[in-house]
Image (cartoon, rainbow, N blue to C red):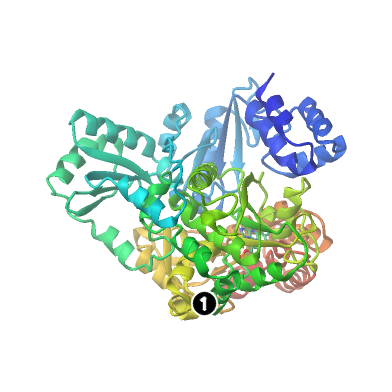
Amino acid sequence: MSDWRAALDALPRERTWLLPALHAVQHDLRWIPSGALAAVAAHLRVPASEVYGVATHYPEFRLSEPGKRVVRVCTGVSCRISGGLDCLAALERQLGVRVPATAADGSVTLEPLDCAFNCSMAPVVQVDHQDHGRVAIQDLERVLSAPPSGFFWALADDLIAGRSSYPELVSHAQSRAYRGLTFVLAVGSCSLSVGAVETFAALTAEVDRRGLQAAVSPAGCSGLCWAAPMLTVIHPDGTTQLLPHTTADRIPALLDAALAKRVEPDPRVTDFLRRQRRELTSRCGVVNPHDIADAVRRGSYAALAEALAGRSPEHITQTVKAAGLRGRGGAYFAAATKWEGARQAPGSPKYLIVNAEEGEPGIFKDRHLMEGDPHRLFEGALLAAYASGASRIILYVHGEAHLSAERMKDAVASARAWGFVGERILGSDFSVEVEIRRGAGGFVLGEETALMESLEGRRAMPRPKPPFPTEAGLFGKPTVINNVETLFAVPLIAARGEKWWAGLGRGHGTKCFGLSGHVARPGVVEVEMGSTLRDLVERLGGGVPGGRALRGVVVGGPSGTVVPPRDLDEPLLPGGRVNPGTGGLVALDDTVSIRDVIRTLLDFNTRESCGKCTPCREGTARLRDILDTAGAPDGPSIAELAEVVRVASLCGLGQAAPLSILAALRDYPELA
Ligand SMILES: Cc1cc2nc3c(=O)[nH]c(=O)nc-3n(C[C@H](O)[C@H](O)[C@H](O)COP(=O)(O)O)c2cc1C
Ligand code: SF4
């Protein structure tokens, strides 16, 4: 029996398994033939027409056979202004196809990609789902012929029979600590796209060749994507050295220098870290994401243990409420209010959904957090479930965020082995089950009710609200949905108290941003809320390269706006004049056409409109067409139409879609 048939047979015969079933087919065959669609329909007892409707709705599902290799070129704003479009044109010439198309001999499919979510490594070319970052035209030959490579780290067998108290788990973790010479390589989506696998192999081989008594271990990225691959050397005396740009060929020389302690600290690295307020990200780039013992030694699950040992769910909720934690998924809604609502709502089971869909071009901070410190997210999810009365956690991870999904899978498996998942956790009355689900593309899928529709096996189309998810969410049951970054803050607030968080960032805590585009140091940074774009783009990002002037900064992706240089000193605050949005910043130098950027954002929103409501479905397309055809667009009529779309659309996609053009008409007179 083929793999997908076996996987399908293993699934319960319920509609909720429709996306996992389609994923199983595509994983096995690389596409979904009509026969497989029929088999899925029959097994799940869903009408074939509806299965077809769902399969054609999600952009990642392929209903026609792709070429032997699939090459995709990112055309998101960060990549298109960094040479992505030139790469695409060069590949068209080289492969003899016009995008999107499969070569006549079936050897290759070439496609544009809205975003590879690896914006700090722009421009990105993907070959068979493997990212290649910082690609120049002269690299394309090498990129096309690169063998497939992936990073694999075996989980330790960590089932600790007979241990159930947290102090016992901590002492077990301590007993496994290695305090000798340690090499920690940052292995994240960013560094994997510039050779981290090769660096890791070269490092391990060199350590073996020299017979060094040393441990080599992976971590996530510390946000220094611009310096990737980044190696940290920890000496037995505690001295630490940070080595940027550790490519495989440099390993022998770098080891010589590191072992002799002759490495001069790179001031740009120290400066980049020192200027941040790294709280949520404090362990990213440090902790081994595949090793729960390492996470526990660094404090993971201590806040959960303390809560379960004697703090009521209401107490946790009150602490988070007093801290003022607001959701980082874009709307900045008070986290504790949702938890309270779900707890008080009738109905069971109750669900806690972790929204790790992150499908908005230019935003990649949630992936960074999950790759870097999955146990911090999982502890946050457990605490939120405890506070809101949820007994089911669903981690909903973007369909193409494979490294995030792998690391979350490992984290959940080892947390289960250590007794943090299941019945009566740490001997308390709290029981919870966990599942990981994957999306299949589409920006609107991240909208909370659309995401629930997809979990129920339907097209990702938002529901009208009310009822709100806390009253009637997934399967009509009380449901809390929180963003990854929101949940990252929870263990820290539970452990350090409400005053600590409320004392940061003008009462808003810290905020993570993905920094890309025309900056010298693209990466992921964490700063206090209320920091300015000047802090982020100039002081942290190192400013615009090549001495060029800044034209603007895209803040918040396709739901955001292009902020002009005159607002660089405005604090980024929820509800402020410049809203931080979800945390994507793309800097644009003075060579960039604002019209092209706005057109890219509008075009994306038009394609991503789910079509459920007319103002968004028709209005976004009209806005883009006016921009395209009018040469000098008619300002007032764009403004009128934009206002209708903003006010009359059902969900946040339509409501936010016109913001970029409205702001650009105001701030960039040449567009009007
Ligand atoms: C079009 C659209 C896309 C969204 N995408 C995401 C997303 O990828 N991740 C996310 O956490 N929230 C996303 N949201 C917001 C969610 O609907 C929801 O508000 C959020 O997950 C709640 O979590 P929070 O309160 O912790 O922010 C999106 C909203 C809209 C309208
Ligand atoms: S606003 Fe757009 S994306 Fe949202 S429901 Fe309406 S058509 Fe769908």
Q: Quadrant of the C terminus?
A: bottom right
**Residue placed most toward the observer, 592 or 180:** 180
Residue at (70% x, 55% y) in the render = 444
The amino acid at mark 1 is Ala
Reply above or below: 381 against 132. Answer: below
Residue at (85% x, 36% y) in the render = 45
**Residue placed most toward the observer, 526 or 637:** 526
Horizontal arrangement in the rendering, residue 126 relative to residue 200 (left or right) = right
Horizontal arrangement in the rendering, residue 189 relative to residue 656 (left or right) = left
Horizontal arrangement in the rendering, residue 397 relative to residue 404 (left or right) = right
**Residue placed most toward the observer, 59 or 629:** 59
- Measuring from the top left, give residue 422's x and y in whole percent: 59, 49
- Measuring from the top left, give residue 385's x and y in whole percent: 61, 61
- Measuring from the top left, give residue 19's x and y in whole percent: 71, 41
- Evaluate whether residue 214 shows in this view: yes
Reply above or below: 132 against 314. Answer: above
Residue at disc 1, secondary structure: helix
Q: Which residue is mark 1?
A: 323
Q: Quadrant of the N terminus?
A: top right
Residue at (18% x, 49% y) in the render = 236
- Measuring from the top left, give residue 240's x and y in whole percent: 22, 53
Reply above or below: 490 against 170. Answer: below
Ligand 1: which quarter? Answer: bottom right
Farthest-out residue, front: 162
Q: Quadrant of residue 266?
A: bottom left
